[in-house]
Image: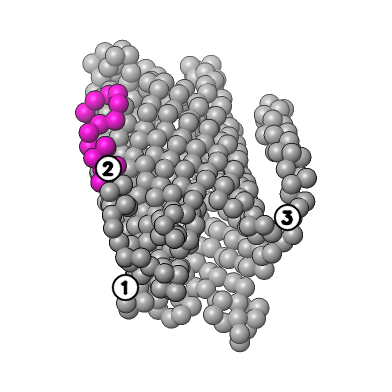
Amino acid sequence: MQQLRRGIGPVALALGVCTAWAPRCSAFLSVDEQNATSLFRYFNDSGHVLVRSLMGDYALKLQNDAALTLHWNNERVTVPAIRAAAGSQEAVDAITTASRPISGNAFQDFIKVRNEMEGSLDRGPAGVDYYYSTETDYLAQQLGGHFNHDFSDEQLNLSLGASYGWDAIHPLANDRSVAVDGTKNTMHWNAVATRVMTPTTMLRVGVELNLVDGLQHNPYRNVYAGGTNVPERHPDHRQRRDAFLKLNQYLMNKSSMKLSYRYYNDDWGISSHEVDSRLSQYVTPALSAEYEYRWYTQTSAWFYREQYLTTSGIDGFQTGDYRMGPLSSHLFGASLNLDLATLAAQHPALGHFGVRVEYQRYFNSNNYSANILETGLDFRF
Amino acid sequence: MTRNGLPRTLRLVALAALLAASAGCAHVRAYQREHLVDRIMSFEAQAKKDARQTKSFDAREGSTGGNGGAGGGCACSN
């Protein structure tokens, strides 16, 4: 019932937006082109956490330079049975930051389902989007908008974006738990410039700022401090900012190299560097392969310690989250993309399809590793 | 490292990025953009993959970001 009540608000909001847009939509609701994509994603890590994702995307080009896109994702997270105290580090963390609750039997697999949907409406240089995600103990919503403009005879494009997100956290608790409901609000801004440098080179640079207020620790996690277990506690406010640079270079043997660098910093004391490189190569006109390598390193938050001597932690804060500590990671990936559009002349039916397969191997300095497999199918009609 | 305000390193990175974007470069006409619109050169073609990847990294690492500014006109929009 509570789930139902929580769902009514967003639906009413969506209906309201549709109603408000309806008279304007009718003027350009003439379908030009459609595209549907389905994607299966399988994630498995060294802690035997499994995440199965079924995603769908639908894009509809409308008249008057308008476009509607919809995205949905059904995700099933399986956290294996544990041999550790409920609420401890061993009992948490899946790919979606889904956590094992204190309630329930920790010696049985815990299964969590997450559903998300996102819709965006673009017209000309501007667009709005709405995001909704729900799971047993978490509800996230976000409303955003963006605008971009070309300059210098389309040599340069500047884009500005902003969004507001509001999350409601309802931890699954029982008599042993101290978890209480919480909220989290996030304001996001970004500014991005994309420039054509030469006939074979493009450059993109950007800055982003996030202001986060509210519950930002794991309500299920305990920290060993002062000789006993105490609930994790992070500061309620966090200012996160980053700057990035991406360079795409076409190489003359029908391949391209994409290089990117990102610097991140926040007022919790974490700063990080990320370098990513991707090499794409056409094997045939329809088939391309891509290889990826990513390196990442970060410093720790000011309140992170390997051990806490007192139950009050550092200025009242203590964390058992390894993401707050020093960390480095590597990722290797390879993918194959088959676009059958080139066969449209000989086989019109096949020309509507595209297929993609990708494998990634991730590992970090926390003795953690993961395998990620994705398969996707595109359909244009 | 200060707890408040933009640190000098981030300001330098942002400044260097903006300078790189505004630096003088050849005027590339529409008919010269054949390679730029190729799908293996696209910023946006992999935007959804990047978004999924960022979500995965958010759950494993302490930072976030790097995907802002999806969209854009001209050859940039591909």
Which residue is drawn at the image coordinates 41% and 21% (left, top)? Answer: A236
Which residue position holds label 1?
A: A251
On the picture, is A66 further left or further right than A286?
A: right
Q: Position of residue A102 (x, y in %)?
A: 49, 26
Q: Which mark is residue B7?
A: none
Dot 1 or dot 3: first in sequence order is 3
Measured as percent of width and height from the top left, residue A161 is found at: 49, 41
Determine if the magenta segment contains residue B2: yes
Comparing B48 with B12, the one in front is B12
Can residue B32 be seen in this snapshot?
yes
Amino acid carrying mark 2 in the image? Leu
In the image, taking residue A174 as reference, residue A281 lies left or right, namely left
Residue type at the position of mark 1? Leu
Image location of residue A122, percent across then percent down: 61, 50
Asked if both marks, 3 and 2, belong to the same chain, the answer given is: no
Q: In the rendered view, would you say A238 is above or below A298? A: above
Q: Which residues are magenta?
A: B1-17
